[in-house]
Amino acid sequence: MNVAFFLRPKFQVSYIYEDESVRAGLEKMKHHGYTSIPVLDKENKYVGTISEGDFLWYLVDENEENLHKISIKSVEDTKIKDILKPEKNPSVKITESVEELLTRVMMQNFVPVVDDLGTFIGIVTRKSIIEYLVKKKED
């Protein structure tokens, strides 16, 4: 068994590009009901994961005294890459061991998966691994 067994391919995953606005990121996450979402660059390389907390801390840190004055317009000019913390949710390569995948999924709701060139190819969710383990126990 390998990482590919658990992979949800890119075409089934929502993601955002690093040069999109904070507003676009917030709207996409709200639309899908997600608390975090993978971030890609123009070459479809995985660059990090952005979360609700990242957005909140950006708003508080940058506008602490004027938080009540924030408007949608004020977040249209800020790009996702300006607030992204790339080291936060590291990806795994598709060739990574299942043991490493399990270690990562214990700390992340989903693990981004990349090919040998760093191109984003999908995610593995904690839910998919738990479902597999439950099914395996039942069998």
Image: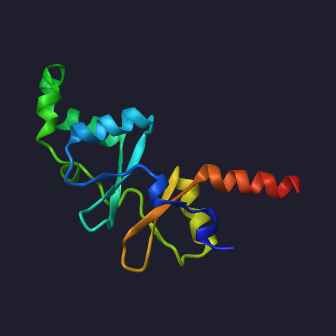
* Colour pattern of the rendering: rainbow
Q: Going 71% across and 51% down the picture, which residue do you hit?
A: 131
- The answer to whether residue 117 is visible is yes
Q: Is 81 rendered above or below residue 24?
A: below
Above or below 78: residue 40:
below
Quadrant of image for the N terminus? bottom right
Residue at the image position 14 percent from the left and 37 percent from the top: 76
Vertical placement of residue 62 versus 39, above or below: above
Q: Is residue 112 visible?
A: no
Residue sitting at x 43%, y 37%: 32
Residue 114, position as x, y percentages in the image: 43, 70
Q: Residue 29 is drawn in which quadrant?
A: top left
Left or right relative to 124: residue 77:
left
Q: Position of residue 84 (x, y in %)?
A: 26, 52
Q: How many marks?
A: 0
Residue 77 appears at what percent x and percent y?
A: 11, 41
State the residue in front, 100 or 79: 79
The location of residue 129, given as percent across then percent down, is 66, 56
Q: Identify the residue at horizontal 64%, vertical 53% (top origin).
A: 128
* Quarter of the C terminus within the rendering: bottom right
**Furthest residue toward top:** 68
In this view, which residue lies farthest toward the front? 11
Left or right of residue 69: residue 31: right
